Image: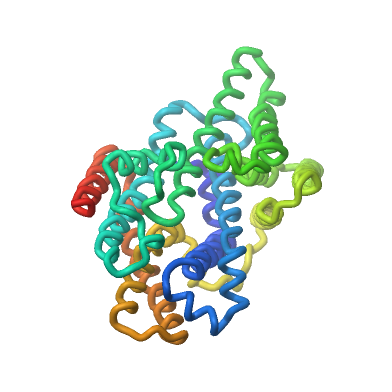
Amino acid sequence: MRSDAVAAAVRLPLLDAVKGLACVVIVGHHFARYGPLPAGASSLAPALFEWLAQDGRLAVQVFLVLAGFLAAGSLAPDGVPRIDRPLARVFQRYARLAMPYLAALSFSVLVAALVRPWLDGELVPAAPGMAQLLAHGLLLQDLLDYEALSTGVWYVAIDFQLFVLALAAIGFSELLQRRCSMRPERSRWLAVALVLLLALASLAVFNRHAAFDDTAFYFFGAYGLGMLVFWIGRATRRSTWQFGMALLLLVGAAALAIDWRSRIAIALLTALMVAIVQRRAARGAADWPTVARPLLRLGRISYSLFLIHFPVLLLMSAALGRLAPAAPWIGMLGLAVAFVLSIAAAMLLYRWVESKPATWSAVLALFAGLLVCGALASG
């Protein structure tokens, strides 16, 4: 069940709009990089395609910050831990991530088997083995060094790791509070302090070394900024909010001074934007009265769109490769149709899977479905 704090955060329309825009950029990044369609279409807008291919991936930082923001509201909305059943929380997070992920991955595995004879082998994932399927289902594929079965699946595994790491940090703070018999006014800052230390370690050490990019430690800087922003926005005193914002700027500036990274700059800007939006909402101000409804809707289905767009791109690439001549306008039209079809598929995935209650039976059924699809694709 969502807390009032999380529900309030979810009701910030601008955040949904930002999620929608970030998802469009990520989809554009993949559309600009993979398959034969962008090879021709890029000549019609070379600067746009180059930017999407090179820098579009930075939009992932937006999702990392927002994921941390919502995690703080769920686990410790006022800095005070609310973790009564940690294992149940872990399963709940896994199920919410895994249900649409397993469904989309099953579809992707079948699509890859269908288009493999007609597309470049580097674009289409190889037929999966059973161990590879199990690793993907358990979100361990990168840690176990298996080839990804679809583009972007690394993010799902990292999101889960980040939640577990945040849960562990907040749970540890609760344990320390009990052992040390801390007073409430002091104990409420312990969880915040531990998250801040983890974020600092990530920004100053782990995020600077690619060897850690399969782990949550690499990404906890952006995720931790999102968590800190949630707590800063909950401050009732203006002076406390101002101190929190100054601390946020100091942390981000120090990280960038140590080693300039565009991804961290984007995460910092996102965190600052979320802090301002949350503050305005808390004071009764409208977030953004002219928010476009399409972006709001995209924001709500952004996770499903992130998961499903790659197999749709594979299908469109294979179809046009066999049925239409290679030409820039054909490639651009194919990408546009693939984008529209991806949104339609995401709406179905959201309605039929993502929005459904997370249960053991549903997860197991979808996990079994992935294994069956993998067996069919390999046979």
Q: Residue at x 54, y 33 (%)?
A: 165
Q: Is residue 90 left or right of residue 173?
A: left
Q: Quadrant of residue 118?
A: bottom left
Q: How many marks?
A: 0
Does residue 227 appear in this view? no
Residue 174, percent from left and from top: 58, 23
Q: Is residue 352 left or right of residue 193?
A: left
User: 58 above or below 44?
Assistant: above
Q: Residue at x 43, y 34 (%)?
A: 90
Residue 254, percent from left and from top: 80, 44
As rendered, which of 357 and 123 lies closer to the eye? 123
Does residue 198 appear in this view? yes
Q: Residue at x 47, y 85 (%)?
A: 328
User: 274 above or below 348?
Assistant: above
Q: Residue at x 76, y 47 (%)?
A: 259
Q: Quadrant of residue 326?
A: bottom left
As rendered, which of 135 and 123 lies closer to the eye? 123
Quadrant holding the N terminus: top left
Q: Is residue 227 left or right of residue 111?
A: right
Q: How is the image coloured?
A: rainbow
Q: Is residue 171 left or right of residue 310?
A: right
Residue 230, percent from left and from top: 63, 45
Residue 362, percent from left and from top: 26, 44
